[in-house]
Each structure stands twice: as structure tokens, then as C-alpha cells.
Amino acid sequence: MTVMIPYGRQDISEADIQAVVDVLRSDFLTQGPAVPAFEKVIATYCGVEHAVAVNSATSALHIACLALGVGAGDVVWTSPITFVASANCALYCGATVDFVDIDPRTYNLGVERLAEKLAQAEKSGCLPKVVMPVHLCGQPCDMAGIHALSQRYGFKIIEDASHAIGGKYRGEPIGNCRYSDITVFSFHPVKIITTGEGGMALTNDAQLARRMKLLRSHGITSDAADMIPQAQGELWFYQQIALGFNYRMTDIHAALGLSQMQRLDEFVAKRHAIAKRYDQMLADLSAMTPWQHPDSYSAFHLYVIRLKLAEIGKTHREVFEALRAAGIGVNLHYIPVYRQPYYERLGFQAGYCPEAERYYAEAISFPMYPGLTEDQQSEVVAALNFVLTH
Ligand SMILES: *Cc1c(COP(=O)(O)O)cnc(C)c1O
């Protein structure tokens, strides 16, 4: 059996392995020094005040929503072209979710669509509490535009930057929260750097950081300043002051992340080189390559092509299946979230976001990860060329 070229995978070095082994030989597997060290390195890299490491980006999105006060009766808006976690986190809080259609060029949440939808929502008195732009494929959204609208309409912003650590917006690192309240990264193995499972929430707001730290560990504090005045002062004293979770990252995971951070820029540069080579090799085929906004330096988590179906005598599904049969582990990011059966049961219907559905009908994610060789890349393009011409 031929081995499938995957769409994404981790890059683990001997130094990464040694960093994990060192933790295993140390006194702390969790709640030790590696987690704050990892948080500090990321905060410094991004130029942000506070970083809160957790066990997944999904957990980070959940506590980010809670820290911003999202609850029953509130509405959170996000992009339909994202992983389900971007929407689910609002439902966890008892809020409802709605979707803003995408920009046809970047496939990110469209700022013009957002402006129209906000104007309507203002009239009907149902403005969102939080808008969650998602930096699809690692390309940042139009954050200045979204931020300007937040000033006008009074919503908070969580950037779902799960694809985007190492990328830049207008020359500054994604994660600096210049245009948002909180930014979230994912460290799942297919993402830019990995901790196995893991995530992080970044903010410049000390109160939000405190709240998220509380929520990641049961709502328990041992900081006297946070406590409700009671008989205290005993050395064993701690208080649960909120209903939190166990969303902690372990030191084993953090050590891997800390080690991976040393190669973050190298990983992103490699992804750019791969993207550039795909752009060149695909130029004459019936496929649109990913357009890049001049404000953005993408982290290139994904390389998504769109088939020009009018020029091809095959369907999207036929091309996808033929590539899989040829050993290319292509994927599709994403099925519009509201088309998932769970969301259809909440009342969403096909056709709700037409631009997102057009994208979904044509998109294919090509293999993209630092270890992808030029030979493998040529094999991927040759397979597409064969499918399109036979
Ligand atoms: C991967 C991903 C998540 C969830 O990340 P986990 O760390 O696996 O929980 C959320 N949003 C987007 C856009 C993602 O790609």
C-alpha cells in the first residue's frame, strides 16, 4: 500500500524529544516551571502582556468567551468557514451563534458583510456581544476594519488565530491583540507549532487574564487579593470563587511547545516557500491559488485551491476522490459550520451564507507542512494535472 501524503503534520526534532524527556525526569509533570516559561516566550514573541496556556484552543475559546461575560441571551458571531470549535464555544456558555458570510478573495469573515449585518442587527435590537474573526489558513482578517466596527457597535473581539501563530498583520505579530480583546492559538499537531494538544489565550487586559487563569483551574485562587474575606491566613488556604474547569496544560506539553518555538519562524518561512512553489506550478491549471492581502503575512497553516469547475469536465467530488486514490491526503477546510446536522437542528438552512457555500463547492486543501519535500509537492501537482486532463 502506498503511504498517503497527509495534508498536514508535525515536525519533531531530537531537541523537542529531549525537552520532553527532561520534564519526565524532573519534579513537576504539571503545574511546574515549563508552563509559565512557554507563556512568557509566546507573550514576548507576540508583543502581548498576558498569555494563558490551556489544554486546547477549544478550551481557550471557551474561557475567552466566559471572561468576556458571554452567557444566556447573548449572541456571538463568527465565520461559517471555520472549525466547529469557533462556534461551539459560544453554545457552551448558553449563548447563541450566528454566522457572517466570507470575503470572496480571502475566505475570511467579510468586513462588508459584517457592516451590513450589524446595521440590520442594530435595527432589530440583537447586536452581538462578541465577534470572532478566524484567520483562515493563517491569513489575518481585516482586523482594523473589524475593530472600527466594534467601536461603533460596542462588541468585543476574540481572534481565533488557531491557524496563525507566526503570521503578521500590517507588519506586526498576530497575537499582539492591537485590534482585539483576546487572541487564541492552537497547538494541535497539524497546526504551525505543536504541544500534542494545547492552546493559549493572549490579552493585554490584566482582568481578562486573571479571569481566564481562574477558569482554567476550577475557579480556585490562592491569591489573597482575589479572595472573599473570611477566616484566612492559614498556609493551606484557597478559595473557589467561580465555576471553573480543569483546562490546564501540563509541563510535558509546554516543554514541547517551548522547544518548538525556537523553530517557529523557520516553519513559517518553509511554508511560504512551499506556497510559492505551488503558486508557480499551479499557474496553468484550472485552479485558483490562494490570494494574499497585501496587509498580511500568512502563517500558511493551509494551502487551499479552488477548482475552476466551469473549465473542468469533472465534479469537485470526482477530483477530490481521484486525488485521494492517487495517495494525496487532500482535505476540505471547511464544511460551513451551519451545514452540520447539529447546527441545522438549531434552525440554520442551506444557502444561508452563499459565498461560503460557493467556496465549499470548490475548495481543496493541498498538503502543506514543513517536512513536505519538493518531490512530494511535484507528485501532488502531477496528480491534480492528471485528474484535470484525463
Ligand atoms: C484547530 C482549530 C480549533 C481548535 O483547536 P484545538 O486546539 O484542537 O482545540 C479552533 N479553531 C480553529 C479555526 C481551528 O483550526
Image (tube, helix red, strand yellow):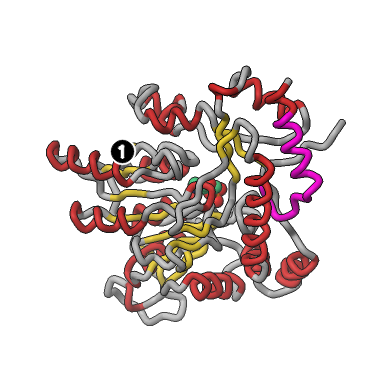
Question: Is 204 displayed left or right of 19 in the figure?
Answer: left
Q: Residue at x 68, y 59 (%)?
A: 270
- Magenta-colored stretch includes residue 371: yes
In the image, is the residue at mark 1 within 8 Å of ligand 1 by its beta carbon? no
From this view, report whether residue 166 is shown above or below residue 364.
Answer: below
Q: Position of residue 30 (x, y in %)?
A: 61, 66
Q: Residue at x 46, y 67 (%)?
A: 171
Q: Residue furthest top?
A: 313
Q: Position of residue 232 (x, y in %)?
A: 35, 78
From this view, report whether residue 7 is shown above or below residue 299.
Answer: above
- In which quadrant will I find the C terminus? top right
Q: Quadrant of residue 99?
A: top left
Q: Residue at x 74, y 27 (%)?
A: 386
Q: Quadrant of residue 267?
A: bottom right
Which residue corresponds to mark 1? 96
Residue in the foreground of this view, choosing between 122 and 60: 122
Question: Is 2 displayed left or right of 359 in the figure?
Answer: right
> Dominant secondary structure of the magenta stretch?
helix
Q: Position of residue 265 (x, y in %)?
A: 62, 66
Question: Is 123 displayed left or right of 3 in the figure?
Answer: left
Q: Residue at x 44, y 33 (%)?
A: 337
Q: Residue furthest front?
A: 284
Question: Is 104 displayed left or right of 200 in the figure?
Answer: left
Give the residues drawn in magenta, as a range: 368-385
Residue in the foreground of this view, choosing between 357 and 25: 357
- Magenta-colored stretch includes residue 306: no
User: Would you call the spot at circle 1 few (<14 residues within 10 Å), some (14-19), or many (20 or more)?
Assistant: many
- In which quadrant will I find the N terminus? top right
Amino acid type at image mark 1? Thr
